[in-house]
Image: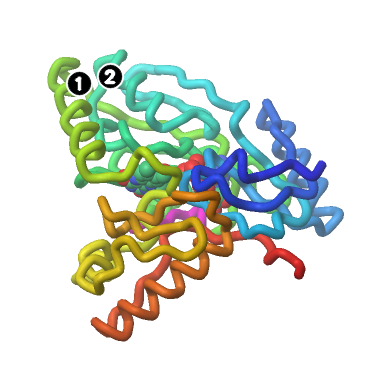
Amino acid sequence: MDEDLSTYTFTHTGGKADLFVTPSTYEEVGQLIAYAYKKEMPVTYLGRGSNLIVRDGGIRGLVIHCGRMNQITSAGESIIAQSGASIIDVSRFALAHERTGLEFACGIPGSVGGALYMNAGAYGGETADVLRQAVVVDAKGKILTLCGDELDMGYRHSAISKKGYLALEGTFHLKKGDPKKIKAEMDRLTALRELKQPLEYPSCGSVFKRPPGYFAGKLIQDSGLQGTRIGGVEVSKKHAGFMVNVDHGTASDYIRLIKHVQQTVKKKFGVDLETEVKIIGEKLQE
Ligand SMILES: Cc1cc2nc3c(=O)[nH]c(=O)nc-3n(C[C@H](O)[C@H](O)[C@H](O)COP(=O)(O)OP(=O)(O)OC[C@H]3O[C@@H](n4cnc5c(N)ncnc54)[C@H](O)[C@@H]3O)c2cc1C
């Protein structure tokens, strides 16, 4: 009870969860969700917190954290990963098993569940390219298997995000590859990230989705917003699409800075920036 969520988010911000549970089996997850449904209790799913801003007032009801369900196994051309596994670990596992297709994910700091939810992607690759099947739980606690079109993957969304399912596991179909080439590609992408992204500070990655026909970072840069700071949160000077927590920033600092950037870009270029980061939870009561 009253678990501090700032320790579970990459921005190091956020209030407390009323009830915080870390189940270790799929059956436990099903039972928890069925119980919450019966009691009409709100339920929130948490991965590694790398794409989340939890408001400073925290989250009412039940928070389910999938981190203990983190096994990765190989079966022929498939790799099966539980939702709490880190997608970086899955890409390394694929390299160790000489499988190609997950190199793009080698620097995405989220969980498998978060990658399935968001259809996470980078450098021309995305989860949808290699995901064949997902095991999920619906709002009543029933365990379902989704394949093909049922996964409904699009730019930063999926059936899981649209229908509010909890993702339990993903099956990735990966072709046999040359480990030297796979490793070289992972090293290249890691070097690019280190060069371009402010990885030395807490952040939630790209704050905004790519607006059709534009790049969010370029619009922000051309609006002269890099280095703008509210409270302890700053528009990164290294990558304009990132907001970094440079000095004990709060979720409220993040939200005010996001609004300021949206308003400035709208005024200057007439473009609406939609957040990629998910903002959840309650405002702090004054
Ligand atoms: C430095 C940095 C770099 C990044 N680079 C990239 C990048 O290149 N490409 C990219 O796509 N993203 C990137 N991100 C963002 C983030 O890592 C991804 O969006 C990731 O997929 C989020 O996973 P997570 O486990 O951290 O999810 P969380 O932040 O914990 O949650 C995000 C959303 O997913 C939902 N969710 C999480 N787990 C589950 C589950 N098991 N079942 C159902 N819903 C769930 C949550 O409810 C929430 O709505 C970056 C972030 C950082 C900090």
Q: Amino acid at mark 2?
A: Leu
Look at 74% across and 41% down and name the residue there.
3
| Residue under numbered circle 2 | 95
Look at 27% across and 68% down and name the residue there.
220
From the image, which quarter does the N terminus lie in? top right
Look at 60% across and 55% down and name the residue there.
54
Above or below, 92 against 284 in this view is above
Above or below, 276 against 71 in this view is below
Above or below, 57 against 150 in this view is below
Which label sits on residue 132? none
Magenta stretch?
154-161
Distance from Cα at disc 2 to Cα at disc 1: 7 Å
Q: Are marks 2 and 1 in contact (CB under 8 Å)?
A: yes
Question: Looking at the image, which is closer to me, 212 or 281?
Answer: 281
Q: Is any part of residue 154 visible from this angle?
A: no
- Left or right position of 24 against 210: right
Which percent across, then down, holds residue 203? 43, 48
Which label sits on residue 183? 1
Quadrant in which residue 252 is drawn: bottom right
Question: Looking at the image, which is closer to me, 90 or 223?
Answer: 223
Which percent across, then down, holds residue 37? 78, 54
Label 2, residues with CA under 10 Å away: few <14, some 14-19, many ≥20: many
**Magenta run includes residue 155:** yes
